[in-house]
Image (cartoon, grey):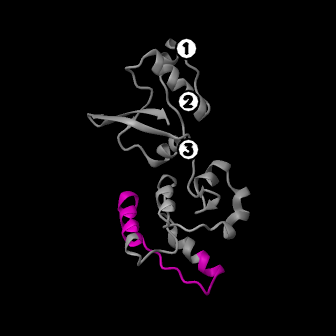
Amino acid sequence: MPNAQTEVNIFEKYYPNIKVKLVNAGAGSTEYQKFSTVVQAGSGIPDVVMLEFDMMPQYISTGALQDISKYVGNLKSKFSPWTWSEVSMGGGVYGIPEDTGPMGLFYQTSLFKKYNLAVPTTWAQFEQEALVFHKKIPSSIFLISRIQMDNGCLGCYGRRACFPFKVQVTTGVSVSTLLRL
């Protein structure tokens, strides 16, 4: 994470009795494997860990993350509702939202026009247009994304309880069809 040491320095300036040992455990699957290993071992578990939104539920459900509501509940109004919901589960809060940004939808206007589809402006509308498209052409795919689909995109689908149920990889492209469960 860029500037992590700067953030640690600022924190220690405000809390001089707390010393932070910054450990770069990698990112993505490398980090999660290391974190899962120390959690399972019950030793070496960090006091603070940076996780992506889509990874939090598995660690919350296993007890690896603690409810910090009583420490951070007053911060809720400082975040957009969807980001706060990503770090909350079952009435508890398990993290502070960080690292959000804009996303865009690229679409083929000719297909939308041909099949009389509205350009979605919400995830609910995206879901509805995908269902309409699928009914009109059951053999076609509504969404195509690059093989290294980032977790930001997957997190957005997860917010609507949509998960890829079919993935076909050919020549470096993954094709995912989404189904609302």
Closer to the N terminus: mark 1 or mark 2? 1
Helix, strand or loop status at disc 1: loop
Q: Residue at x 61, y 76 (%)?
A: 11
Q: Residue at x 51, y 44 (%)?
A: 158
Left or right of 166? Residue 154 is right
Q: Position of residue 147 (x, y in %)?
A: 35, 40
Q: Nearer the viewer, residue 67 or 123?
A: 67
Circle nearer the viewer, 3 or 1: 3
Using the numbered discs, state the Cα–Cα distance from disc 3 to disc 1 in whole angstroms.
Answer: 27 Å
Say whether residue 54 is magenta.
no
The amino acid type, in three-letter code, at marker 1 is Asn
Residue bearing the label numbered 1: 116
Residue bearing the label numbered 3: 159
Q: Position of residue 22 (x, y in %)?
A: 47, 75
Total tally of numbered discs in the picture: 3
Closer to the N terminus: mark 2 or mark 3? 2
Say whether residue 29 is magenta.
yes
Determine contact: label 2, label 3, CB under 8 Å.
no
Residue 47, relative to residue 163: is it above or below? below
Q: Position of residue 94 (x, y in %)?
A: 58, 63
> What is the quadrant of residue 76 in the picture?
bottom right
Q: Position of residue 152 (x, y in %)?
A: 49, 47
Closer to the N terminus: mark 3 or mark 1? 1
Dot 2 surroundings within 10 Å: few (below 14), some, or many (20 or more)?
some
Q: Residue at x 51, y 18 (%)?
A: 112
- Which residues lie in the magenta part? 10-39
Left or right of 91? Residue 56 is left
The amino acid type, in three-letter code, at marker 3 is Arg
Residue bearing the label numbered 2: 126
Q: Which mark is residue 157?
A: none
